[in-house]
Amino acid sequence: MAQMDEPVCDNSDEINLLDYLKVIWKNKIFVTAVVVVVVAATTAVSLFMTPIYEAKAVISPATAKPAEPSGITAIASQFGIASPASSNMSEITNLLKSNILRERILTKYSLFPVLFSGEPVKWKSEEEKMWAGIRFLETAIRVNPVQKDNMIQITADFKDPRVARDLAGYALAELTEYMSSEARRVAETNKKYLESQLDKTADPFIKAKLYSLIAQQIETSMMAEVKENFAFKIVDPPRVPDKKVRPKRMQMVMISFFVSLFLGIFAAFGKEYVAKARLSKTGPSDPTSSNATVQTM
């Protein structure tokens, strides 16, 4: 009884590591050309990129003030006046990120000619001009609160290292001025209101508490007038940076090398696949048709 032929496993189509290496070696000139072109282009672009410098400053919010006696606190809340509290990280961070502070910086220090120097920009209106400046500062000045250390880091980027230092300094100066002026305004408003309440009460206890609250508002106003360390303390003032932070040319070249290498290898396998596909289409015709031709001869 004839045994059935066992199926023969054809492993010729299996792709192994050697096949990969053969394809890469076959297309080594193509892969090398891709790497050289991409790396050279990246190097050229990085050389023409404008160097950017970064200035840093670190501040710490003012420490909390001693708690007021419960009687004064109760009287203050009765009149709708909150006891003066120390500034916190979220308040300072939000102010540094606010458009109000950016607009004050742009206006006070006349930064438009500096920020947009060499760029022939014509704005249709002052509002459009202000928004352009605000968006510029939004990317140029960054705020990074560090909760665990109770610190806030302010960084300013610009192509001129001195301007980068100045931008960080302007942000701190305007933050101090704004918080001081707001504290004085609120304290003065509260003081006038409390003074108006003195004539409306005959209770000596209430009057004594009102005088204490008025003194408290005067103290707050005086402290805000001094400004130094009123809302925050400058731990590390901004300095003129001596090294650029961008572009990182060596890093760009290394990344472009590896990326172009993988792209070149991928393209080489693509070429090999297309070549095999074309070869299969243009190969010999169906063998059954050739056998039929021979039998008719």
Image: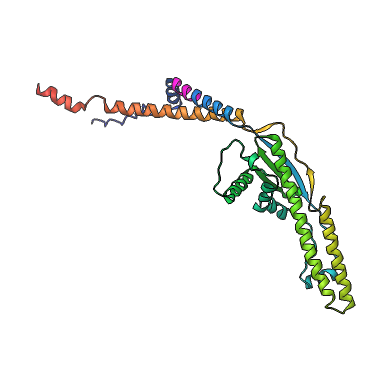
Extreme bottom residue here?
A: 202
Q: Indicate the quadrant where residue 66 lies.
A: bottom right
Residue range of the region highlighted in magenta in the rendering: 28-35
Q: Which residue appears at 82% of the width and 55% of the height? A: 225
Residue 18 or residue 26, whichever sits in front: 26
Q: Which residue appears at 56% of the width and 38% of the height? A: 120
Image location (x, y in percent) of residue 95:
69, 53
The answer to whether one can see residue 67 in this image is: no
Image location (x, y in percent) of residue 172:
74, 47
Image location (x, y in percent) of residue 181:
76, 56
Image location (x, y in percent) of residue 213:
84, 67
Q: Is residue 152 magenta?
A: no
Query: In the rendered view, does 268 fall on the left or right side of 120?
Result: left
Residue 55 or residue 257, whichever sits in front: 55
Q: Indicate the quadrant where residue 54 lies.
A: top right
Q: Is residue 31 magenta?
A: yes
Q: Is residue 169 above or below residue 46?
A: below
Q: Is residue 138 above or below residue 284?
A: below
Residue 118 or residue 229, whichever sits in front: 118
The answer to whether one can see residue 187 in this image is: yes
Query: In the rendered view, does 70 fall on the left or right side of 258?
Result: right
Extreme left residue here?
A: 297
Query: In the rendered view, does 237 fall on the left or right side of 130?
Result: right
**Quadrant of the snapshot with the C terminus:** top left
Q: Which residue appears at 82% of the width and 59% of the height? A: 221
Q: Is residue 182 above or below residue 268?
A: below
- Classified by dominant secondary structure, the portion drawn in magenta counts as helix
**Quadrant of the snapshot with the N terminus:** top left
Q: How many marks?
A: 0
